[in-house]
Image: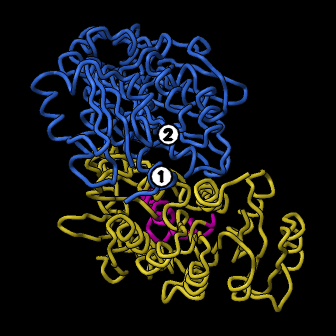
Chain colours: A yellow, B blue
Amino acid sequence: MKIALLGFGSVGQGIARVLAERDLGITITALADSKSGIIDPNGISLESVLARKEQTGSCGKTGITAEEIVRTADYDALVEVTPTNVQDGEPALSHIRTALARGKHAVTSNKGPIAIALPQLRALAQGRGVQLRYEATVCGAIPIFHTLEHGLGGNRFLAIRGVMNGTCNYILSRMAAEGLTYDQALMEARQLGYAEADPTYDVRGIDTAIKLVILANSIWGLGARLPDVDVTGIDRVTPEALSLAEKQDCTVRLIGEAIQEPSLLRVSPRILSKDHPLVVYGTLNAITLETDLAGELTFIGKGAGSRETASAVIGDLIFIRDCYVKGP
Amino acid sequence: MKIALLGFGSVGQGIARVLAERDLGITITALADSKSGIIDPNGISLESVLARKEQTGSCGKTGITAEEIVRTADYDALVEVTPTNVQDGEPALSHIRTALARGKHAVTSNKGPIAIALPQLRALAQGRGVQLRYEATVCGAIPIFHTLEHGLGGNRFLAIRGVMNGTCNYILSRMAAEGLTYDQALMEARQLGYAEADPTYDVRGIDTAIKLVILANSIWGLGARLPDVDVTGIDRVTPEALSLAEKQDCTVRLIGEAIQEPSLLRVSPRILSKDHPLVVYGTLNAITLETDLAGELTFIGKGAGSRETASAVIGDLIFIRDCYVKGP
């Protein structure tokens, strides 16, 4: 199976490293980062491209662009792993659209295009008989979409609730464990690389809300958008609130919650008993599904990291390889 | 998609009820219970066959046998949900073999044939280009095999550990919560229908060991058998052992554990901290996977029940429908 890879930051390089490590029958025939690109119909040498990126900061030649690769290169699946643009999903959205329209499968870790345009992209993929997969967009290493689609394929989904942002969960875990203030815990998270320089997107609950939109639209075929979610972040949670919860053997977690009937999309800090399945610690993520046949199921795992995200992207690729392209 | 269903006890009836409730594009063209059978190439009426079973105890006519159905009926997938025979897996094993040899997909909830003959059945299915699926054999509603195969497809699996028997977990939960003896808790489990009249198979750890064999053989392509597992049951766990654990904020769980390197297959009662992810309560099941890319993941859900098992069987059927037969 041949793939074109767009994005060669930590996720893109993570994917290349895994493909170099093991024989999965997957070859990269085209690759672009923000400054350069490389096309080789016989398969790009992963060792040399990883070394070149490290030495020069670029993966290939200037002048070869992502647009050109998407439109003209020979590949079975486009793998789009550039950073998320929440405003309009571009340029990733156009790239995915072009690939699907060409009858190519598309796999992405990019929340922007999926949160903004899932119904349209899905219709386009179905019309062309190809797969659009985005396992890496929600809860990193937890294969939630494979589970929803196949493992629990015959079920009706009544509700989904989750801890979907590792930054918030780390901050809340540390505030409760050490009595830190929000600002102290945030500073610690930054020092450890768990929070970005501008943490707004995470701590205000926007990242969780985007993931909730993707989940709800996937499960129920809705066309919900980010403004449809009622969002409260963790930036006003006080050490006093946490110590009060602690006294009742409870704690606080930022929960994204989607309910089918009556319809609800909400992100908010919630007080939960410490033995609640969603009370996970540190940067872990957790998702609970309420289903009509299988009952309640909970999945716990790492929410971020380049190998974890690569795991999700490669799981999507292996599914496409086995079920559509046929592999080695 | 047409299926032939063998077994019309609680699981078989559960599947028929779900197929009657929702349009999944799946039709039952042949059905057999232990005494009778029915074949209808146009699709059996599920409402009438469920009513007939309830009224007469039989689903069809004597003289139509499972053998005949497997060999001659028109179906895309055989669904084998008769009770487990741990000794030689028969007659289910022969039925599955015959169906695969005819180029039919096979889905089963029956641990016997899978624990005994997975490598051979898998080779037969691969040779014929059909699917052999058995999601319902391990941890009921938790779609562990879909997760291993697709969601985490690119990963190497280092270890798998789980609470895989609801009867044992219920007994241990109740002994710890109420200070009951093993015999008192077992009696309570029997009264609630969580333990069979002869609980040996569950409480001695044999059921867990069989599931461990199925998991290990699936993940690592081994040919392990039941005698390869080092098994200790819960029947000698004392209230004193539990109260001692309790004093250290720990408890006891029957854990099935498979490690790749150095190779280990073991079932035994283990002392675990109460915040360990495998400490679930009542009849719940839980599985933790240790992987090289996705890190550690935990899945928690119901381990038994006719709707839960039907969920697993139908998930397998939907996968086959979407990826092999093509659906509605």
B144 on left or right of A71: left
Mark 2 residue element: strand
Position in image of residue A104 (x %, y %): 62, 74
Q: Chain of mark 1?
A: B
B252 on left or right of A111: left
Mark 1 residue element: helix
**Labels 2 & 1 near each other (Cβ < 8 A):** yes
- What residue is drawn where x is 38% and y is 16%? B202
Q: Which residues are magenta?
A: A165-193
Q: Please tell me whether residue A245 belongs to the stretch shown in magenta.
A: no
- The label on residue B12 is none
- What residue is drawn where x is 35% and y is 68%? A216
- What residue is drawn where x is 39% and y is 34%? B73
Q: Are marks 2 and 1 on the same chain?
A: yes
The kind of residue on which mark 2 rests is His
Tell me the CA gap for discs 2 and 1: 10 Å
Residue sitting nearer the eye, B101 or B292 = B101
To which residue does mark 1 refer?
A: B325
> Is residue B249 in view from this perspective?
no
Q: Residues within 10 Å of mark 2 (few under 14, many from 20)?
A: many
Residue sitting nearer the eye, B11 or A86 = B11
> How many tags in the picture?
2
